């Protein structure tokens, strides 16, 4: 069909040339000495020269057939629409703008000239990059999908792998490009450079999925976008809170999956040894902690230090556990102790021993009313919600109270001890439970939703943009607490059919701002 279209294009070009050749020709100009004749002839010349353009007008009744054929061809080049198993429709490429005149009807610029449907990661990986990384890599990788329904794209990969502050293969700019080119060179890749890239005005190759919204036509911009905004802090979502990899035993433990639990020891057999600078060192089983301790249940977020902006290495869950203060009182910790170390096969880190930290530390044995899974730290773990997740050690076996040299005890492991409250995860904000290019209804409100997590800082506001960040609409989130994320809703009504790209960013009460906005495209029909 597309080859047939090219034939029509050539025919149309020939028709244009023929019409131009048949146009009346202007009379020769009058002699320069005859001023009256010169004026008359010039007017006639201008009038005649404009007639070929009038003949070729889109609305001219002399050639309607040609434009009907071109309009039909434009329909043949419409962007691909996919229907998922749940009935959701996805259109990755916007319908081209009406004012881009190529075919005498709604333009096929995006699909014909830019070939947008056949560019970018998801043109090959239809189930998305999270599926590729989680299920189709030849070597273990951190799980990217934690049940939050975010859009994982190449920008997320670049944020981690092109990071000069990281170690190993990530410790220089351009590391991601080196790796991904090597991977595609090794596999049976049937595309070419422009499958993944585009060329900038400076002639340099750029990543298509990063640049595409600056190139594609048909994206409607809305200045000072408006919508009904609401938020809460009790929304629970996330498949796991075991973000650290590798788990104590190595990669095999990680790949077992969150549905598995230990079977060789039950609560009555798993012992925790309490020792160090205490009056009453003792050992206690997990079952005894559950039976005798003052259990508390509350909702809490947890985020991995290695998470990326809009990444899924976080969750909010309901946890049940016993305050560490109960263990301290039973052990009789000596005056002057300045550190405690919860030890496990995950490793161990001395934590500051002070009221601020102790009062925010629990021994947790249930998540969402169920026993911990293997990956989440069965049978019991430390829970420190205002720390990075790696300090909430899993499957703990020992708690040691110590008096350390001041420089060792004061290691700033706690986010709140950092002098600068600004960081790439302070706050971390994302769209959730949505697909890139999701088809929605024009003229009807559509509710976007997602999280804003400030680690140990209160989220104070969210801002939304629908014009590429030229204007932002601020929505305050007063009286939030730092232990829980902010789960937000923004009901936006697309007044006209077409594509819209909505962005979101956040701010904390301490002045931290999102490292980069998250964004998603929807297509209103």
Image: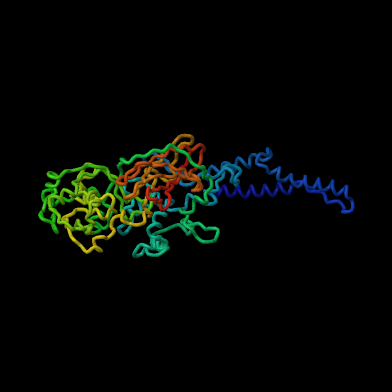
Q: State the image coordinates of residue 463 (x, y, percent, origin top left).
A: 44, 45
Q: Between residue 3 and residue 272, name the one nearer to us.
A: 272
**For the point 31% across and 56% down, which residue is it?**
417
Image height of 137 relative to 319, above or below: below
**For the point 41% across and 53% down, which residue is it?**
515
Q: State the image coordinates of residue 377 (x, y, percent, origin top left).
A: 21, 51
Q: State the image coordinates of residue 462 (x, y, percent, origin top left).
A: 41, 44
Q: Quadrant of residue 84?
A: top left
311 left or right of 70? left
Q: Is residue 411 visible?
A: yes
Give the total of numbered labels: 0
Q: Outermost residue, front direction?
A: 335
290 left or right of 225? left
Q: Outermost residue, top direction?
A: 444
Q: Outermost residue, right direction?
A: 33
Q: State the image coordinates of residue 135 (x, y, percent, origin top left).
A: 32, 53
Q: Quadrant of residue 171?
A: bottom left
Q: Between residue 500 and residue 414, name the one nearer to us.
A: 414
Q: Between residue 354 and residue 92, name the one nearer to us.
A: 354
Q: Between residue 323 and residue 141, name the one nearer to us.
A: 323
Q: Quadrant of residue 396?
A: bottom left
**For the point 32% across and 51% down, which residue is it?**
313
226 left or right of 17? left
Image height of 310 relative to 203, above or below: above
Identify the colour scheme used: rainbow
**For the point 22% across and 59% down, which residue is it?**
350
Q: Is residue 179 visible?
A: no
């Amino acid at each position: 069909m597309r080859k047939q279209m090219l034939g029509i294009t050539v025919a149309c070009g020939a028709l244009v040339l023929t019409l131009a050749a048949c146009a009346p020709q202007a009379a020769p100009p009058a002699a320069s000495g005859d001023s009256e004749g010169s004026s008359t002839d010039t007017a006639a010349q201008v009038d005649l020269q404009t007639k070929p353009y009038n003949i070729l007008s889109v609305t001219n009744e002399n050639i309607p057939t040609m434009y009907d054929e071109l309009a039909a061809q434009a329909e043949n080049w419409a962007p691909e629409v996919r229907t998922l198993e749940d009935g959701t429709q996805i259109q990755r490429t916007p319908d081209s703008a009406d004012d881009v005149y190529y075919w005498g009807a709604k333009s096929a610029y995006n699909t014909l000239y830019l070939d947008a449907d056949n560019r970018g990661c998801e043109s090959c990986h239809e189930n998305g990059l999270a599926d590729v990384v989680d299920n189709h890599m030849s070597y273990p990788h951190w799980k990217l999908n934690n049940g939050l329904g975010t859009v994982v794209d190449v920008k997320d990969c670049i944020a981690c792998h092109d990071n000069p502050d990281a170690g190993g293969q990530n410790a220089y700019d351009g590391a991601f490009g080196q790796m991904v080119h090597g991977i595609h060179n090794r596999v049976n890749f049937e595309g070419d450079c422009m499958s993944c890239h585009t060329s900038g005005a400076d002639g340099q190759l750029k990543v298509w999925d990063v640049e595409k919204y600056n190139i594609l036509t048909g994206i409607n911009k809305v200045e000072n976008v408006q919508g009904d905004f609401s938020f809460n802090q009790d929304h629970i979502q996330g498949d796991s809170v075991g973000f650290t990899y590798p788990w104590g035993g190595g990669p095999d433990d990680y790949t077992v999956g969150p549905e598995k639990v230990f079977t060789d020891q039950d609560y009555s057999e798993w012992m925790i040894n309490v020792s160090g600078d205490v009056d009453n060192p003792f050992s206690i089983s997990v079952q005894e902690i559950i039976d005798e301790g003052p259990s508390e249940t509350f909702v809490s977020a947890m985020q991995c230090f290695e998470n990326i902006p809009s990444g899924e290495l976080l969750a909010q869950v309901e946890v049940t556990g016993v305050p560490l203060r109960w263990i301290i009182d039973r052990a009789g910790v000596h005056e002057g102790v300045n550190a405690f170390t919860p030890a496990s096969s995950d490793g161990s880190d001395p934590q500051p021993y002070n009221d601020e930290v102790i009062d925010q530390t629990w021994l947790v044995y249930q998540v969402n009313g169920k026993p911990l899974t293997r990956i989440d730290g069965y049978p019991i773990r430390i829970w420190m919600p205002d720390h990075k997740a790696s300090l909430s050690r899993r499957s703990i076996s020992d708690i040691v109270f110590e008096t350390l040299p001041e420089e060792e005890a004061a290691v700033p492991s706690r986010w709140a001890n950092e002098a600068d409250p600004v960081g790439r995860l302070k706050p971390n904000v994302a769209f959730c439970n949505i697909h890139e290019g999701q088809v929605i209804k024009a003229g009807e409100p559509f509710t976007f939703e997602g999280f804003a997590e400030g680690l140990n800082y209160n989220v104070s506001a969210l801002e939304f943009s629908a014009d590429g960040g030229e204007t932002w609409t601020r929505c305050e989130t007063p009286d939030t607490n730092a232990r829980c994320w902010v789960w937000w809703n923004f009901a936006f009504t697309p007044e006209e059919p077409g594509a819209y790209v909505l962005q979101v960013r956040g701010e904390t009460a301490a002045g931290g701002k999102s490292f980069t906005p998250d964004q998603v495209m929807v297509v209103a029909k």
